[in-house]
């Protein structure tokens, strides 16, 4: 496996992300609060975004090194279903606490850039490898 280009002998041709912010934050992008719904007590959460502006850097290496990108959009609809019970976890040394439950997740995902479009298989075909949902506090919010 080649970290920057996928399996050895293949070439990664698309890498959609918001880029790297001047403060170094990467792979993170704000979305409207209305796009997320969480009912942790019921073990349910969802996130839906349509036509979120992104950049297609084509490869991970290009994305990480600030290479050229092209405008693109991504859309996704994710649904988490929690498997109770909630498990509490606190790490006072690193200032982290939270309540979590293992879950399953389904996702529909698509991307579009000039001359290219991708649509995932239907959400019902999703196979969860690992998913967790919960609430956490860390950093300056740890003691709150």
Image (spheres, rainbow, N blue to C red):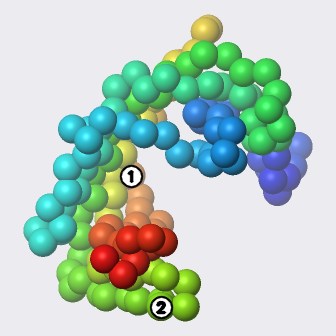
Residue 64 location, quadrant: top right
- Residue for point 55% across, 84% down: 94
Residue 140 appears left or right of 101:
right
Residue 88 location, quadrant: bottom left
> Looking at the picture, how far across and down is residue 15, in whole percent?
67, 34
Write down the residue under mark 1. 126
Instruction: Find residue 49 and name its label.
Output: none
Q: Observer-nearest residue: 136 or 139?
A: 139
> Looking at the picture, how far across and down is residue 83, in whole percent?
24, 76
Q: Observer-nearest residue: 30 or 74?
A: 30
Residue 26 appears left or right of 86:
right
Does 27 sit above or below residue 113? below
> Looking at the picture, how far across and down is residue 136, in whole percent?
35, 72
Residue 116 appears in view: no
Q: Observer-nearest residue: 114 or 86?
A: 86
Which one is in front in this view, the residue at disc 2 or the one at disc 1? 2
Q: How many marks?
A: 2
Q: For the N terminus, which image quadrant? A: bottom right
Residue 115 appears in view: yes
> Which residue in the rendered view is the most extreme toward the left?
42
Q: CA distance from mark 2 to mark 1?
A: 36 Å
- Residue for point 79% across, 21% down: 68
Residues packed near mark 1 inside 10 Å, few (<14), some (14 to 19) or many (20 plus): some
Q: Observer-nearest residue: 25 or 41?
A: 25
Q: Quick one: SS at disc 1?
A: loop
> Which residue in the rendered view is the most extreme toward the right?
9
Tell me which numbered mark, 2 or 1, is placed earlier along the sequence: 2
Residue 139 appears left or right of 79:
right
- Residue for point 31% across, 77% down: 144
Q: Quick one: SS at disc 2?
A: loop
Residues packed near mark 2 inside 10 Å, few (<14), some (14 to 19) or many (20 plus): few
Write down the residue under mark 2. 92
């Amino acid at each position: 496996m080649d970290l920057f280009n996928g399996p050895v002998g293949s070439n990664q041709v698309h890498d959609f992300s918001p880029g790297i912010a001047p403060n170094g934050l990467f792979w993170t992008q704000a979305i409207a609060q209305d796009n997320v719904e969480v009912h942790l007590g019921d073990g349910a959460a969802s996130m839906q975004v349509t036509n979120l502006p992104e950049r297609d850097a084509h490869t991970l290496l290009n994305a990480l090194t600030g290479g050229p990108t092209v405008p693109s959009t991504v859309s996704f609809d994710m649904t988490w279903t929690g498997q109770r019970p909630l498990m509490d976890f606190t790490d006072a040394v690193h200032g982290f606490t939270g309540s979590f439950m293992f879950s399953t997740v389904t996702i529909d995902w698509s991307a579009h850039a000039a001359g290219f479009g991708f649509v995932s298989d239907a959400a019902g075909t999703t196979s969860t490898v690992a998913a967790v949902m919960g609430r956490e506090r860390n950093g300056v919010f740890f003691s709150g």
